[in-house]
Amino acid sequence: MSKLTLYEHNPNIEVVTGVCPHDCPDTCSWQVAVDRDSRRAVDIWGNADHPITGGRLCGKVDRYLERTYHPERLTTPLRRVGAKGSGQFEPVSWDEAMRTISARLKGIIAEYGAEAVLPYSYAGTMGFLQGEGMAARFFNRMGASRLARTICSEAGFEGYLYTIGATEGTATEDFAHARLILLWGTNTLTSNLHLWPFIQEARKRGARVIAIDPAQTRTARAADEWIPIRPGTDGALALAMMHVIIAENLHDADYVKKYTVGFDQLAGRVAAWTPERAAAITGIHAERIRDLAREYATTRPAAIRINYGLQRHYGGGMAVRTLTCLPALIGAWREQGGGIQLSTSGAFRHFDYSGLRRPDLLNGRTPRTINMNRLGDALSFDPARLAQAHYAPRPVDRKPAPADAGPPVKALIVYNCNPAAVAPDQSAVIDGLRREDLFTVVLEHFQTDTADYADLVLPATTQLEHWDMLRAYGHHFVSLNRPAIPPVGESLPNSEIFRRMAAAIGYNDRYFAEDDETILRDFVESQRHPVFATVTWDVLMAQGFARLNLPQPYLPFAQGNFPTPSGKCEFYSARMADDGYDPIPTYVAPKVDIGYWVLDGQTIPNPQYLIPNTQSLICISPPAHSFLNSSFANVERFQRREETPILQIHPEDAAARGIGAGDPVRVWNDLGEVRLTAQITAGIIPGTVLAPGIWWAKHSPDGRNINQITPQDETDMGASARFYDTRVFVAVAESESTTLEVALPLTAD
Ligand SMILES: Nc1nc2c(c(=O)[nH]1)N[C@H]1C(S)=C(S)[C@@H](COP(=O)(O)OP(=O)(O)OC[C@H]3O[C@@H](n4cnc5c(=O)[nH]c(N)nc54)[C@H](O)[C@@H]3O)O[C@H]1N2
Ligand SMILES: Nc1nc2c(c(=O)[nH]1)N[C@H]1C(S)=C(S)[C@@H](COP(=O)(O)OP(=O)(O)OC[C@H]3O[C@@H](n4cnc5c(=O)[nH]c(N)nc54)[C@H](O)[C@@H]3O)O[C@H]1N2
Ligand code: SF4
Ligand SMILES: [Mo]
């Protein structure tokens, strides 16, 4: 029974429909019960009418009111009074804050030009308006540096686009019809919960579920089988599966002939990818690879869910590009419940954002683009590092010479993001944030690690308090968020903060005068593509959500129609050749390899390495179940659930280092060091350790978190982050194990 029935006839309660703003594929529709007298929210629940939300929120957002009314919510603008990082602030008025911002930004722009101002944001909210809505107008008008928002998904995205043409694929609802489901580099029960009921429905009808993951996550435990894989080697597994499928003539020759290009080149390439060769890379038995390929090719419908876990490695783009050839090879796209899903965002690709974001306000200027993963480099005074921070996602793109890197970053405006905790190479980020001459403004709900380094902290409203609208990346609905309660304290929506900044600095364009509701309504009403015919303002206001105008079931590629240049699934991609990549699926190894793997308790050296480094380990840091990136990591309930920042380590790796359960351990590499608590578990592939993220650094025992050891370097495609392509040393914290820091070749190349 929906909670709605508890409240809908209560005269003291108003029920307001909204949508979860967080960076999660599920984009749940929610309902909030608000006490009419006090205007306080008293309850929140998942909308039972929404076909994907199904009346349920996840454990985090079910407690959204605890976050919203948290005693540590920021309620007034704050000015820094202590040293950067010390967290000492005093309240100031909004007017005073705006006067300071206007004076500082004008001074910086006059002296260095507008490119010296860098916006820094990600997906704290995925809302159109409170994300890159009014903010985009403001920074476009200014001509500030642009930010390449690459911290999460770009490698996989690009890889998928080369093969398929748009990030479209199997509809979430249709997983219920699959008979085989591969959960490949995704922790569904943690990061994509609302797919699970469809998987369970499929299982009731006899489907088998296999998780392919270095870790035995809660998803892998709930699956029928866990196939442990060495991090960053999924491309090799996919190539070997295709080897078996083609060698045993299990492919769908008719589908391949009609709807793909490059089969001969693909067949030529995978001929050399025997399961034995892939076994030596992935750590999966050759026989298991063979069986997996056969099972995949002969079970219909077969669905694959990949997420972003497998692409946070150097070769992540190519891995996704390669994997996405599988469904076309076996003709899985023909059937409801067949195919692959990385993201459903491509279904929304015809949205016209120009009215919302006003790129015309750039007035012909093309400011430089900084890669957000290289924030540490971007904030460096060294022009060579600043040049490195420029966005150059493909091999054919070039970074500028240091002399052409442009002005130093003198102002940083952070919103919807917590870079001091989430960005790679934390020491470099902190070095930059510590700069006395850097003017930093942070729009936030809480005094985060990043806010501690701000000159001004501006209190922002939460989703309960402002208007917004979202698309999803795990289904096909657009949702409207209506404010349920008045702003907490003096907080303001991001949109209003940027509006006020624009006014203070003297941008008088009428686009800065429009109110939030009008902006959203205009956005909806300005869409011309037929896929949005069902997404009207009236429906959104009445129901809170609207499904895209797509058929159901939605089988986008049952008859080809791939949105690639050839109109087919591209086993051979001419575009990749033009962009400087191998046009045929291949294996791109991770940059960091420890040179050996363990299979059935035996250590097997990787033949690429002259000297396997048996002292280091690969470190991955996927999301903790109860946090959402670094959001919720300051809420006591969720801290208690996660207990403490831990490091999962295999019993053999622990024994080799004299590490016992619960021991404090040092985890370090050439970039930095962090202290964690050892959790010994056979649920992780030997040679790999796992540190669930993302704890706030200041809540961690030594004031640092796992991004101490992650590199700023980019992936092969999309200039994404290589969060999981890291090598670390681990030792019990007390011991001074400097002897372990022997110089050994880090990579094979
Ligand atoms: N509860 C919760 N939900 C979230 C988030 C959160 O922080 N908490 N974050 C949200 C965001 S921003 C995102 S991008 C998504 C991320 O969602 P996912 O992509 O599902 O999350 P990841 O942890 O990046 O990766 C998932 C799994 O990939 C595994 N993995 C790591 N490397 C490899 C590899 O090389 N190969 C294979 N096969 N597996 C590998 C990890 O062990 C992990 O179990 O989740 C969203 N949902
Ligand atoms: N080591 C490691 N690092 C990672 C990852 C990993 O797997 N391992 N995952 C990476 C991934 S996938 C991602 S997506 C990034 C995510 O990194 P972020 O996008 O920084 O995500 P959050 O940590 O959730 O921080 C978002 C912040 O935005 C604030 N916020 C939310 N809503 C609003 C609003 O309406 N207005 C304002 N002003 N602020 C708001 C929240 O309070 C929160 O502090 O982290 C990356 N970092
Ligand atoms: S975080 Fe994801 S699962 Fe949780 S309520 Fe939001 S959209 Fe739904
Ligand atoms: Mo992400």
Image (spheres, rainbow, N blue to C red):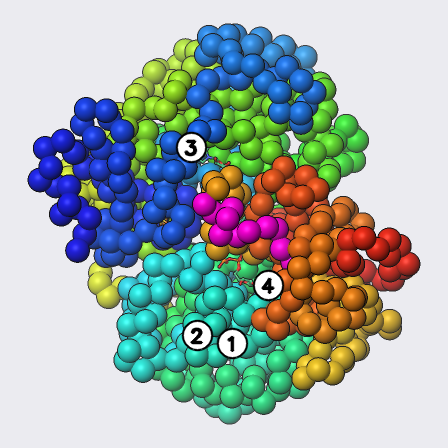
Answer whether labels 4 and 2 touch (C-beta < 8 Å). no
State the mark number for residue 223.
2
Of the residues shown, which amino acid type is indicated by label 3?
Answer: His
Q: Which residue lies furthest to the bottom in this view?
A: 248
Residue at (36% x, 52% y) in the render: 58
Q: Which of marks 4 and 1 is nearer the N terminus?
A: 1
Q: Residue at horizontal 47%, vertical 25%?
A: 74
Q: In which quarter of the image is residue 562?
A: bottom left
> Which circle's residue, 2 or 3, is located before the other in the chain?
3
* Residue 172 image label: none
Task: Report the mark closest to the observer, 3 or 1.
Answer: 3
Task: In the rendered view, tell whether residue 283 sits above or below residue 385.
Answer: below
Callout 2 secondary element: loop
The quarter of the displayed image where residue 683 is located: bottom right
* Residue bounds of the magenta highlight: 637-647
For the residues labelled 3 and 4, the Cα–Cα distance comes to 43 Å
Tell me what residue is drawn at x 49 percent, y 17 percent. 77
Q: Name the residue under label 4.
A: 318
Mark nearest the camera among 4 and 1 is 1
Q: Does the magenta stretch include residue 302?
A: no
Q: Is mark 4 on a helix, strand or loop?
A: helix
Q: Which image quarter holds the N terminus?
A: bottom left
| Image coords of residue 464 (percent x, y) | 32, 33
Q: Distance between the residues labelled 2 and 1?
A: 7 Å
Tell me whether circle 3 and circle 4 mark residues in contact (CB < 8 Å).
no
Q: Verify CB contact (< 8 Å) between mark 2 and mark 1.
A: yes
Of the numbered discs 3 and 4, the one sitting upstream in the chain is 3
Q: Which amino acid does label 4 sit on?
A: Met
Q: Is residue 226 above or below residue 71?
A: below
For ligand 1, tell me if the residue under mark 1 lies within 8 Å.
Answer: no
